Image (cartoon, rainbow, N blue to C red):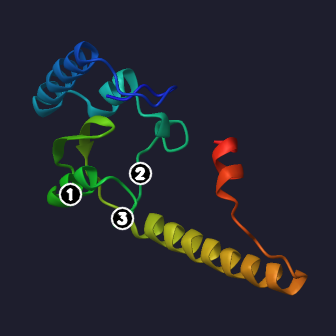
Amino acid sequence: TIDPVTQQPLSDEEIAKKKVLADDLNKRVLAGEDFDALMKEYSEDPGLETSPDGYFFSSGEMVSEFENTTAALGFNEIGFTESSFGYHIIKRLPVTKDELSEEIEYTLMMDRLSDAMVEWKQLAGFKVTKNESVFQNIM
């Protein structure tokens, strides 16, 4: 329901069309059509470019409607929700031990890198000061 380029809300007419399409796709998935095929054909999620197999996330990383719907699903169940970003048809997949291990390893590595960067800035004598007016001009 948001234009991916301008980040502005779509018109009421465009939103109504998206809702009809989302409802239709949800019915098709629940009737047994291939979720992945429909996702590849119809999804407008810009995140699919970097995460074509879906998202691995923990609490607080996604909008609450998405998280709550996902949390209420069993493995391989389908859910439907609306958020400020639009309509979401969600299939919750089980996570393998290997996938979980990779995600944990990546998270730990990023945490260590973040801690190291703080230490390096201190050692080098860097001080970060946020100037709100400059920040707003950049945005």
Residue corresponding to mark 1: 68
Q: Element at badge 2?
A: loop
How crowded pointer 3 is (Cα within 10 Å; few <14, some 14-19, many 20+) is rated as few
Q: Earlier in the sequence, mark 2 or mark 3?
A: 2
- Label 2: few (<14), some or many (≥20) within 10 Å? few
Q: Residue at x 21, y 60 (%)?
A: 71
Viewer-side label of 2, 3? 3
Disc nearer the start of the sequence (3/1): 3
Q: Left of 83 or right of it: where is 126?
A: right
Residue 40 lies, in percent from the top left, at: 39, 27
Residue under circle 2? Answer: 55
- For image coordinates 81% across by 84% down, the residue present is 122
Kindly identify which residue carries mark 3. 60
The residue positioned 26% from the left and 38% from the top of the image is 88
Measure how far apart labels 3 and 1 are at the Cα level: 10 Å
Outermost residue to the front = 133
Circles 2, 3 touching at the beta carbon (< 8 Å): no
Q: Relative to the observer, which residue lies in front, 129 or 27?
A: 129
SS category of the residue bearing label 3: loop
The label number, if any, that marks residue 90 in the structure image: none
Mark 2 and mark 3: Cα distance apart in space = 13 Å
Among the 4 quarters of the image, the one containing residue 83? top left
Kind of residue indicated by mark 2: Tyr
Q: Which mark is nearer the camera, 2 or 1?
A: 1
The spot of residue 89 in percent (x, y) is 24, 37
Q: Quadrant of the C terminus?
A: top right
Residue 56 sits in which quadrant?
A: bottom left
SS type, badge 1:
helix
Tell me the amino acid under the disc marked 1: Asn
